[in-house]
Image (tube, grey):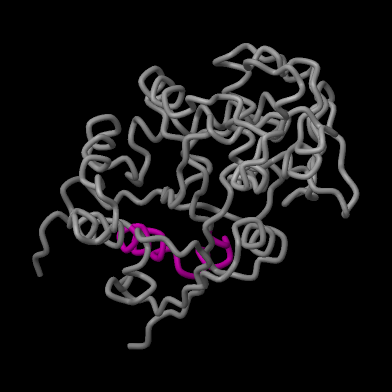
Amino acid sequence: MSELPLTLACGDYEIVSALIDRKVKPDGIDLNVLTAMDSTTRHWRFLRNQEFDMAEVSCSSYLIARDQGLPFDAIPVFLHRRFRHGFIFINTQKGIRGPGDLAGRRIGLKQFQSTAIVWMRGILQHEYGVPLETIEWVCELDETIELAGSPRLKVVRLPNDCSVERMLAEGEIDALLHPDLIHPLIDKDPRVARLFPEFRQEEIAFYRKTQIFPIMHVMGVKRSVLERHPWIAINMFHAFDDAKNAAMKRLANLRIVPLAWYREAWEEQENLLGRDPWQYGLSRQNAANLEALIDYAHEQGLIRRRPTLDEIFLDVFQGRKRGDEFRI
């Protein structure tokens, strides 16, 4: 019997490498994996153009898509997580000494709805008391999905020839929230620094308080594909899980990564975050993570109502104790 051909767009990560090189094969599926796009391009092409059957996609943009009734669903697979305190940057000449100094400032963003930026705004508001409504938010990109936004937040869209990274270095904006490390910081430009010089300690404290290792991306699926083949949700969930487990087993070998204290870093992560910080599914910890993001997205005007997790994620449960041991 022929296998179902499906196209998946995602990042080229170690935790999916077994799917990319076909060492792990989802049952009944001939998977074509595309990895050559950057994240923002992939999100646009999936949510705007519906070019792929499945795609790793911004969690906040997926929430907006569902809020607007667009035909997408998601599997609870989270290929990208990242702590975010280290991605808040400041101009060093603006007298910003701590989060409280961001009130009333002009702050740059790549785009307003980026999941990373939703997390950063939410953390600044809830953990440090920064009043978001006092800030002018300056956005470089157009949004992945158009949205009205919150009337209490002032959002400005920049012309195409503007760069928020350059504007930060030159003092045209006071601070910048960005999903990635920015070039002025990498180039050691003295005009630019992190808001939190000891960001790692801030992130550890945040995790100990909240048990949140922020989820960035979910696994989106076109609803039209699921309507024809509802079985692919469970099969793909297990294939992603098998690929992740294969990666973790491989990376347990100290010789794989050319870092002198790699094992110590591995053990430090395990001691803090547990044996499987990249766990898929709607565990209690993952549910709390996602519900916090939903709250932030609603407060910031990205979505009109708070959906339940059962509304926005496909059920991949196949019965208690089923699948633990293969028997014909």
Vertically, is 28 above or below 179?
Answer: below
Q: In this orientation, which residue lies closer to the viewer: 311 or 93?
A: 93
Percent position of residue 88, x then y:
62, 31
Percent position of residue 117, x then y:
64, 36
Q: Can residue 230 be found in the magenta stretch?
A: yes
Percent position of residue 284, x then y:
34, 30
User: Can residue 63 be seen in the rendering of this structure?
Assistant: no
Image quadrant where residue 181 sits: top right
Q: In this orientation, which residue lies closer to the viewer: 145 or 325?
A: 145
Vertically, is 53 above or below 92?
Answer: below
Q: Is residue 88 left or right of residue 163?
A: left
Vertically, is 195 above or below 283?
Answer: above
User: Can residue 6 be seen in the rendering of this structure?
Assistant: yes
Residue ID at (27%, 74%): 23
Image quadrant where residue 243 sits: bottom left
Image quadrant where residue 171 sits: top right
Residue ID at (84%, 25%): 151
Residues rendered magenta in the picture: 221-240
Magenta stretch: dominant secondary structure? helix
Residue ID at (54%, 15%): 127
